[in-house]
Structure formats: structure tokens, C-alpha cells
Image (cartoon, rainbow, N blue to C red):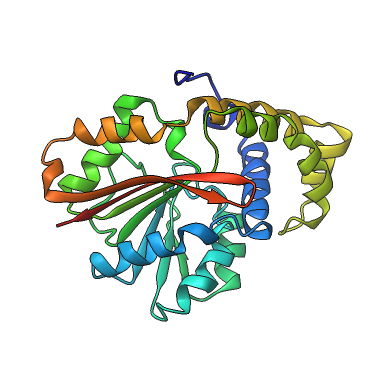
Amino acid sequence: MGRIHLFEFEDQQWFPSFLRNYGTDFLQFLSNKTKMYKPIIHVIEKGLKKSKTDQVVDLASGGGGGLIWLNEELKKNNPDLKIILTDFFPNISAFEYTKNQSDNFEYINEPVDVRDVPKELKGLRTQFLSFHHFKPKDARQILQNAVDSNSAIAIFEGQERSFPSLLAMFFSPISVLLTTPFIRPFKIGRIVFTYLIPIVPLFVWWDGIVSSLRTYSVKEMKELVDSLENKETFVWEIDRLKSGPGVILYLLGIKK
């Protein structure tokens, strides 16, 4: 199946930010509880070690909370680790909640464009569950900006264009209904727009299915890399890992 770039509610400027935040909060909660990122710990540690940095600049962070569990695991071998959360639509309340879980989290208040990251933000760039939001031209620009800035980059996607992935997304509203009372920080609006006016489960359902259809395959990520200028100045690793019943696709680029 070819990549299909349908619209996601989360990407729309007109979509209310509080509803967008409820969706990203759900994704972060789920990734922590399922320890979804466990298989990619060695990938991030390789990126940190090879690029000689203890700082992660997380791009398109959403709620940022998905890194809480991963952060504790990474600190075992990287005690000086610092993670900076950024987003084009910063979810400040969620960023604050994440920061309160560990003193090595920081965040940027202002919008950060992943296609043109401020030069003062140094460290291993990461993207979790967000690369599929960008059309090929913009996805290429993200990678080219990393190369031009001599910045290591690690990209992770927790879905793919496959029947099992689409099936999981189809039933995602059930997960939203079951987990919402346990998501922190608690917000009465989240309850209202999940159970009384069920906008959150419906938009998570749609965006989840579209995310699978949008996700770049390993082959397509390799094609993006092949199109970059000065790509040979980096070492590239692109692969697919099992994560419980699901899968994680990843790209790691490190300056030679």
C-alpha cells in the first residue's frame, strides 16, 4: 500500500488546542504504561554516545509525557542526561507536569519548527510518533536541517501501514474510554469531551488510522536520506523493531 497523506485534526490550525492536548496526553499516557519505547533504548544511547552529548532536544513533543518512563531508563547509563521538550503548538501544562516528574526535563515556551530548529538548541534531536505528520518535502527538510546543523537525529514511529496497525487504530476509542480517568494532570474538560461529548475518542480514532496510512516505511525513509545533500557526512541506520504486539520504525543519523 502506498503512503496516503490524508488530513489529521491534530495538524489543523483551527482545531482547538485543548482538544489537541487531550489527544497527545492520551498518546503519552499509553506509551508510558505499555513501555512502548523499551526496544529503542539502545538506539538513543548509541545516538548520545556517538554524538558525544548528554542532551536530547525532543521535537514535536506533543504532551512530552511519553518520555517520562524512557527518561528514567536512559538515566541509568546517562546520569547527566537533560531533555528539552519543544513543539510548534507547545502544551505548556503537560510540559510542566512532565518537568515536575524529573528535574532533568526542560521545555521551550515558544513554537519550534522541526524544519528549522534554532541553532542554539544543541544535542541529539528526537521525534516520537510525529514524523508522519510531514509531507515528503517537509520530512526531507527536517533531515536536511539536521545534516546542515551537524546534529544527530533519531526518529521513531509506533505504527506502520499494515493491517495489524490499522486494526489497532480502529479500536483506539476503546483505549481512550478506558484510560481517560487515569491520565494526569487531571482535567474536567477531558472527562466532558471524552464521555459526555465524545470528540476526543472520535478524533483519536480518525487521526490514528490516518497516522498509519501516512507513516513512512523503512524503504521510504531510506529514499528520503538518499535525496539529501551531504548525506555521506552522516552514518544512517534505518530499521524496524518489535515492541510487544506492535512495531517501531526508526531512523538514526549521526555525524561521522
- For residue 54, say whether it is visible: yes
Q: Position of residue 220 (x, y in %)?
A: 34, 29
Q: Is residue 213 above or below residue 185?
A: above
Q: Position of residue 182 (x, y in %)?
A: 79, 57
In the rendered image, which quarter is residue 137 located in? top left
Tally of numbered tags: 0
**Quadrant location of the C terminus in the rendered image:** bottom left
Q: Position of residue 214 (x, y in %)?
A: 49, 26
Residue 237 or residue 63, whichever sits in front: 237
Q: Is residue 253 left or right of residue 199?
A: left
Q: Is residue 228 left or right of residue 185?
A: left
Taking the spot 68% from the left edge, 47% from the top edge, the residue there is: 26
Residue 172 or residue 199, whichever sits in front: 172
Q: Is residue 52 left or right of residue 203?
A: left
Residue 108 or residue 62, whichever sits in front: 62
Q: Is residue 183 left or right of residue 191?
A: left
- For residue 15, say whether it is visible: no
Q: Is residue 221 above or below residue 122?
A: above
In the rendered image, which quarter is residue 107 located in? bottom left
Residue 253 or residue 88, whichever sits in front: 253
In the image, farthest residue toward the right: 196
Q: Position of residue 180 (x, y in %)?
A: 79, 49
In the rendered image, which quarter is residue 83 located in? bottom left
Taking the spot 51% from the left edge, 68% from the top edge, the residue there is: 71
Taking the spot 57% from the left edge, 32% from the top edge, the residue there is: 10
Taking the spot 54% from the left edge, 47% from the top edge, the residue there is: 62
